[in-house]
Every structure is written in C-alpha cells, then in structure tokens.
Amino acid sequence: MNKASIVPLALLLSACPPPLAEQPASPAAPTAPTPTTADAPTLAQAEAFLARVEPELLELWIAHERAMWIQATYITDDTDLMVARANEALMEYVATQASQAQRFAALDLPAEMTRKLNLLKLSLDLPAPSDPAKRAELAAIASRMKSLYGKGKYCREGGECMSLGDMSRTIATSRDPAELQELWLGWRRVSPPMRQDFARFVELANEGARELGFTDLGALWRSRYDMPPAAFEQELERLWGQVKPLYEQLHCYVRARLRARYGEAVVAPGDPIPAHLLGNMWSQDWLNVADLVVPDETAALDITALLRAKKMDPKAMVKQAEGFFTSLGMAPLPESFWQRSMFVKPADRDVVCHASAWDVDWKDDLRIKMCIEVTGEDFTTIHHELGHNYYQRAYKAQPPLFTNSANDGFHEALGDTIALSVTPAYLKQIGLIDEEPPANVAPLLLRALDKISFLPFGLVVDKWRFDVFSGAVTPERYNGHWWQLRQRYQGIVAPAPRSEADFDPGAKYHVPANVPYTRYFLASILQFQFHRALCQVAGQEGPLHTCSIYGNKEVGARLDAMMQLGLARPWTEALRALSGEEQMDASAMVEYFKPLSDWLSEQNQGEQCGW
C-alpha cells in the first residue's frame, strides 16, 4: 500500500501469490503452437499436468514466502541472497510450466481447467527469461533494488542519519518549507543508484513476458482483469472520469488553504501544488495537513489521543481490530498469528516497516508486519491489514491457483471497506468515546484528504511503468515523464529542479519492489461500492458516510461468501455476489462524499481552480 505507512488503502499485500484473472482473447494473449497428430495433447494430459503443477507451485510459493518474511524482518546481505535464490527458483519453475501449458491452449477443456492454465501464465509479477544467466541476473537485481529501498537513509551534514519513518514523521508535522524540502530531497537520494539496475530490470522482465506471448510486462499485468488489456485501460480512464471533478474540488480548496499558510510566493494561485507541502513523502495523501485545511469551527475526533488515553499498546490495537471481524461472525485469528507477526519495529536490525499482510502457508499461518505506532492512522491501517488476513483465510479451501482475490483490487478494497466502518458510531460501540460528536464536515474532509487525494497517484505509478515497459519512454526520459504525469493527473510539482540524474519513481516502494499499483486505484473505487452494498444489507438509514457494519452478522455472511470464491470465478461474478452489480462504479464514492462536495463548491467560490 506502499501507500504511506499511515494510509490503509495503499498498503502492500505482499503475502499472496500475485493476483490473477482469466486471460481474454486479445492481441496480447499467448498463442499456442499447432501440434502435430503424433503429439497432439489430450484432456487426460492436461488434467495430469495441472495435478502435478499445482502442488509443486504451492510448495515453491511457501518457500518463497518464508524467505521474503525473513528478509523483510531481518535485512542483511544473506537474507537478500536467500530471497534472490527463492525468486529465481520460482521464476524458473513458472516460466517452464507456463510454456508447457501453452500446449493445451487449443483443447476444448472444462472452464475451470482453462482458467487455471491461463492463470498460470499470469502468475508472476516478474516473469523471467528462460536463459539461466539472465534469470539469475533478474532475480539479483530485484532483490538488490528492494534491499536498497529497505536500508535507505538520509544523513545530514554532521552525521545525523534518518530513516524513512523518521523523515515521514517530520514531514507530517513540520510547517517549515525549508526543512520539508530538505527531507523530501534527502529521501530521493536513495533511488538514483537504482536507475541503471531498473533499466536492465525492464529489459529482462520484458524478455520474460515476451516468451509467454505478451508484448511487454505491462501487457501481462493488464491481462489479469477478465477483459482485453486495451479495454482495461479504457475502464481506468472511465472510472477516473467519474471521480476527477471531486478531486479537482479538493485540490482547489487545499491549495487555497496552503496559500493562506505559506503565501503566494510558495503556493501560487492556479499553479500545481509543491509536492513537499502536503504532509506525505509522495504527496499521495494529504491527511497530515488536516490542521491547515480543516476549519477551526469544525470538530474532528482525535483518535490518536483517544487511544493513548486508553493506554492501548500496539498489540491491544490489533486485538481491537480482530474484534471487528469476530463481531461479523468470523472466527478469531489463530494463536500463531500473535506469536509470529511483527507488530513493532525491532531496535536491533533493519526491517521493512511497510505494513503488509501475509499468508505464509496458504492455509492458517496468517501474519501482519508493521511498525505500529499508537496513532489513529495506524489503528485504521490495522483494520485494513486484517481484512487481507480474513480474505486469505476465507479462500484457503480453493485449489492453489484460485487462492487469491477476484482481482487484485478486491483484496485492497476489502481491507479498506472495513476501515470505512471506523466511524464515530463504531468508536462509541467499542468504548473509545462516550458520545458521538455533532455532525459537521470534519470527518468527511479528513477522509477525503486520505481517499480522494490518492486517486490520481493510484493511476500515475502504473501509467508511468506501462509507458516504460512498452518502450514509449526510454531511460533517458524516466524522471521527466514521471513528473509530467504527476503534474497532469495530480496537479503536483517537485519543490526543486529535477533532472535525469534523478530517479524519483524509485523513491516509491512499489517501483523497486515491482508491486503492481493499479490495484490501489481500483480499491479506491471498489471499497465504496462494497460499503454501499453492505450498508444496504445492514439496513442503513441516513448518509452513507455514517454507516458502520460492525456487529452485523448478516453482513459478515454476505462478505464471507464472496471472499470464499477466491479467484475461482471472474471478478464480475464476485462483485455480483456481494453487491448485485457487475461493473465497477465510482458513483458510490461520489454519493459518500456528496455533502463534502457541496461544501467544497461553496468554499471554492472565487478561487482559480485547476492548474
């Protein structure tokens, strides 16, 4: 996710095998060679192939996941090497078996078998070339870039070194533009050493994708959504078009408030917003500038203060989040979860603090990895991460190739749907407050600073990568194109001149870690669609943003039934099982924020909106 470590929507789901979907017939789809009569494959051979591959693949997934867990919680050169070797073994196996699976493409197979064979071809975010030396090189580069990010620090003159977490906390609270710019630039020193590696990474990953019949790695990623890749790109733009007016209203209002704080010399009317002023290292959410933009006359609940008043520690926060799911009728987490998860940052070693949910054995070894701090943001994030864990457990009875969410956006959306129910009503039910505060714009504005602000960033990361993977953007234009997209979609600019000596995309975890990012944009849309549907099941009366599904076992049963489907059916069927709808639709998000949208329109009177 990662979105920032405090933002539930953008949190990384690193524990699952890569989300997959049925491969449609399209120009990007692999084509099988025409067999001769002598070696024509049979249904029995296809059945035997899948019967062998699924358990072997599961064994490799588990071994890979264990290596990844160790590296993420204990970063050393040795654990880097462990992960590189596990990556290489998995890439080699999948590439070999996916190639063999193409023998059966022309057979008239049962739908379930066809789906499994297609999913196998799409089962790696990083397909490796068949050449062993290139495969080893790709695995080593992938591990090295992720490790560079995880160990990244900024050292000031005089020797003080700051981790990403340290810098993020300062960026969240400082209102000194010079200090904010220093830290913003300081973190981006971690990524230029990745630039050459990344260019080679793209070459090798594209070679692996082409061996599977795809034009490039981006085409492979876009083929996971039960529609042709080009249609999926159009779907993203359609959804963005539904929410863009809402984003532009928020951008206009926040820019005016920042201008009031910093002056026109720093934040000019009608210009993009300087990226370092928005309270987040990547400007991907704006929640940390709430003190500058939430009107004084409105009261916002300070969940951080409430948690600290109750003397809740990180483990107690996780226990409370577990209680949300048990209130829906779901079973408690296994004892091993409490023994094996990482809840706080160890004092003696480097770790990846990026919040993530893990399913190490694809059955019951559920874990989360977080450097939890007692804050309202982390309280919400924990609810999100446990949403992943409960989804993972729900589909554990599916065959290995179906053990994932209906599409990758579903997994992120499920966690965020739960987080939407962290409302004043819920906080009262669990005893954090005695009375709900009077209705005002503050709760919606705070949520908008988290959810709406993220929307264009959720598109930009993969739009940039798709252009890079396709060759439309060469290494000589990496950084320039990154900032062109950020200005076009987000209305954001760098606070200082950037050049092609920089590699600012690499300062975002998901780029060096090769984690697809479109899932977070889809989750931004789907979570409100899920929320509206579940609130209807709960019989919610009143504004959508006041609804909490806490304690409703009928909602829990509806949710669990959808989650149990895993990846066995196209995502449209899973969506129908939950909501009765078959198309992703941002109208629920627009409905949720309608009272805020009306208020923003009033506030923006006389402002020069746009950029």
Image: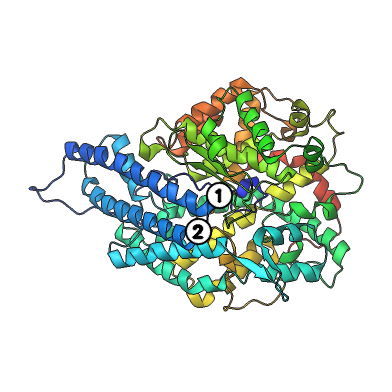
Q: Dot 2: what SS?
A: loop
Residue 172: quadrant of the picture: bottom right
Dot 2 corresponds to which residue?
513
- Where is residue 235 shown, x and y percent of the image? 52, 50
Task: Say whether residue 581 is left or right of residue 249.
Answer: left
Identify the amino acid type marked 1.
Leu
Task: Say whether residue 10 is left or right of residue 252.
Answer: left
Q: Is residue 357 above or below residue 148?
A: above
Q: Is residue 322 above or below residue 373?
A: above
Dot 1 corresponds to which residue?
12
Q: Is residue 457 above or below residue 303?
A: below
Q: Residue at 57% across / 78% down in the picture?
A: 500
Residue 153: quadrant of the picture: bottom right
| Residue 416 visible somewhere in the drawing | no
Q: Residue at 46% across / 51% down in the picture?
A: 68
Q: Dot 1: what SS?
A: loop
Q: Are marks 1 and 2 in contact (CB under 8 Å)?
A: yes
